[in-house]
Image: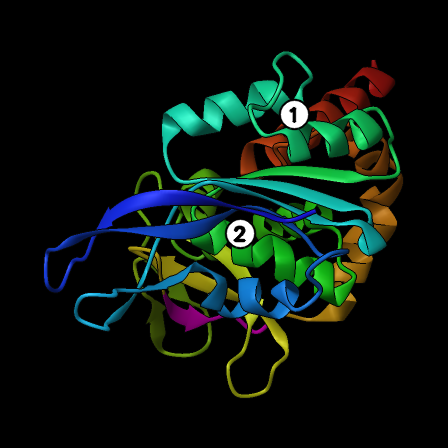
Amino acid sequence: MSKKIEIEIKCPYCHIQNKGERWDFIDTRSNPELKTAVRSGEAFIYKCPSCDTPYDVDAPFAYFEPEKKFFLMYTNNKEDYEEALRVLKGEEESMLSEVRAVLDEILTDETYAKRLVFGRDELFEKLTLLDHGLDDGIMELLKIAYGQKIASRRNGDVAAAVTGKGTTTYAQSGTGKKTPEFDYLRFFLDDETKIGCLYLMKDNKRIAKLNTSRVVYNQVLERYGAEVHEREKNQVEINFRWAFDLLQADREKQMAAWE
């Protein structure tokens, strides 16, 4: 069952502190309407009772969508991230009884995807992939594939192209334009076409869209699907580092086969 908790919060507009409520745990079995509210961001909006101004409240919460066998813990700071990681690894119990009850049921069940995310853009990416029936591990590999293309056009490196570490301005071959400087790649819905696309992100904002293809996704799925499925079991951090480690292990396996 979903649960709200009481909070004291200072309005960023009138600067008056009031009591309010925010979602601490969302279970779509009891509140199916929250699927849409979370994806639109409406679930995080608080209306100040003093000045009647709505504003976003960014705070950690847990999300459970059992019909898709999906559980997620959202965090926005390092301390909460590390605590949630311990909870999802079974090393520590959640302070929230509703979350404990769900995890007691699904923690060791490999048919459930359990994810830990940091920040809103990663949250929305995971939910977009879930809605599209796409595997987030395959998508992380796909980002690396596109990062390789971007990096090769200006002698950059893949880590820089995908995560923003190092030089991130790369020439776009054949267009006469340059790929703008960006921090990382994310998969979101195009606001106009409502089709999922990879975006270049800068300062947590979309700055450009990449021409992506389901055909390329399927190629990565065919090549790595079995290994991704095996490595995703009971893994909660599916990100660039996870995908990079998978490719490194695969490369080492291939090299060992030649020895």
Drawn side of residue 257 relative to residue 74, left or right = right
Q: How is the image coloured?
A: rainbow
The range drawn in magenta is: 206-211
Q: Is residue 56 above or below residue 84?
A: below
Amino acid type for the residue under numbered disc 1: Leu
Question: Circle 1: is it few (<14), some (14-19), or many (20+) Cα within 10 Å?
Answer: many
Drawn side of residue 74 relative to residue 217, left or right = left
Q: Which residue is mark 1?
A: 88
| Label tally | 2
Residue 209 within the segment the image draws in magenta: yes
For the point 87% across and 32% down, which residue is it? 110
Q: Where's residue 170, x and y in %?
A: 36, 58
Question: Circle 2: is it few (<14), some (14-19), or many (20+) Cα within 10 Å?
Answer: some
For the point 69% across and 27% down, which residue is it? 100
Question: What predominant SS class does the magenta segment belong to?
Answer: strand
For the point 55% across and 68% down, which residue is it? 37
Mark 2 and mark 1: Cα distance apart in space: 16 Å
Residue 151 shows in the view = no
- Seen from the viewer's position, the closer of residues 258 and 172 is 172
Amino acid type for the residue under numbered disc 2: Leu
Looking at this rendering, what residue extends furthest in the bottom direction?
Answer: 192
Q: Which residue is mark 2?
A: 123
Report which quarter residue 77 is drawn in: top left
- Seen from the viewer's position, the closer of residues 227 and 74 is 74
Report which quarter residue 52 is drawn in: bottom left
Find numbered disc 1 in the image and state the secondary structure of the residue it sits on.
helix
For the point 40% across and 44% down, which residue is it? 6
Lower position in the chain sequence, tag 2 or tag 1? 1
Residue 119 within the segment the image draws in magenta: no
Report which quarter residue 29 is drawn in: bottom right
| Dot 2 and dot 1 residues touching (CB under 8 Å) | no
Q: Where's residue 126, x and y in %?
A: 62, 53
